[in-house]
Amino acid sequence: MANVASSRERRIVVAVDESEESLSALRWCLRNLVRPAPGDGSGAKDTFVLLYARPSPPVYSAVNGTGRSFSEDVTTAVDMYGRDLADSVTEKARNICKDYGNVKVDVKISVGDAREVICQMVDKLGADLLVMGSHGYGFIKRALLGSVSDHCARNAKCPVLIVKHREA
C-alpha cells in the first residue's frame, strides 16, 4: 500500500525577490524536493507558489521639505517601477520552474513588509513548507536590519527551509 503522505499534493511556498540567493534557493528546492511524476495516473503534483512581497508604496506629503509640491507623477512612477520589478522577478522564477513538468506553479504578489506578508500568505495558503534563501548577513547587519528568514523561521505556521547560497 502506498504511503498516503507521499501521494498527496504538497503546497510549497518559495519566497522570491531580486536577490540571487532567493533564485538559488528555488533551484535547490526544485532539484532536491520535487518528486517524480506518479506512475499511477493519480496526477498528484506538487504546487510551487512563488511569493513576491512587494514593499508598500511610500507615502509622501503633498509638499516636500523644501516647500515644493511633490508630483503625483513621481508617486505613480515609483509604484509602476515596483509593479514592473515584481513582474520581472516572478517571470524569472517561473522560467526556472518551466523544466519541471511535474509541478504546478502559482505566483502570488502581495504588498507589505516581507516578514509579515510571507507569514500571512503561508498561513492563508495552507503551505506544507516555506523555502527561503539566506542573504548570509553577519551578526551586526542582521541585528541592525533584521532578518526576514529568521523572522519567518520563528513565526511561520509551517516548516521553514532556509537555503544557503553557494558561490559558483
Image (spheres, rainbow, N blue to C red):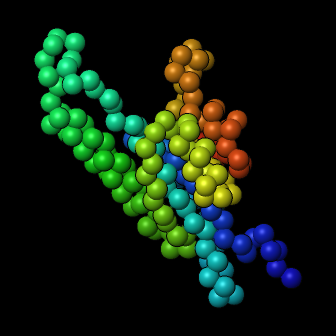
Image position, residue 103 (x, y; %): 55, 70
Residue 92's quadrant in the figure?
bottom left
Image position, residue 123 (x, y; %): 64, 51
**In the orientation shown, which residue stands out farthest toward the front?**
62
Image position, residue 26 (x, y; %): 52, 52
Residue 122 sits above or below residue 102 on the image: above
Residue 30 sits above or below residue 21 on the image: below
Q: Quadrant of the N terminus?
A: bottom right
Which residue: 21% across, 40% down? 76
Residue 144's quadrant in the figure?
top right
Q: Is residue 83 left or right of residue 166?
A: left
Q: Is residue 138 left or right of residue 39?
A: left
**In the orientation shown, which residue stands out farthest toward the bottom?**
41
Which residue: 46% across, 39% down? 112
**In the orientation shown, which residue stands out farthest toward the top?**
66
Q: Nearer the viewer, residue 21 or 156?
A: 156
Residue 69 sits above or below residue 34 on the image: above
Whether residue 12 is visible, yes or no, is no
Q: Nearer the viewer, residue 147 or 59?
A: 59
Which residue: 57% across, 50% down? 121
**Image mark count:** 0
Image position, residue 84 (x, y; %): 28, 48
Q: Nearer the viewer, residue 146 or 138?
A: 146
Whether residue 58 is visible, yes or no, is yes
Q: Is residue 16 left or right of residue 116?
A: left
Q: Nearer the viewer, residue 15 or 97?
A: 15
Which residue: 45% across, 59% down? 107
Residue 37's quadrant in the figure?
bottom right
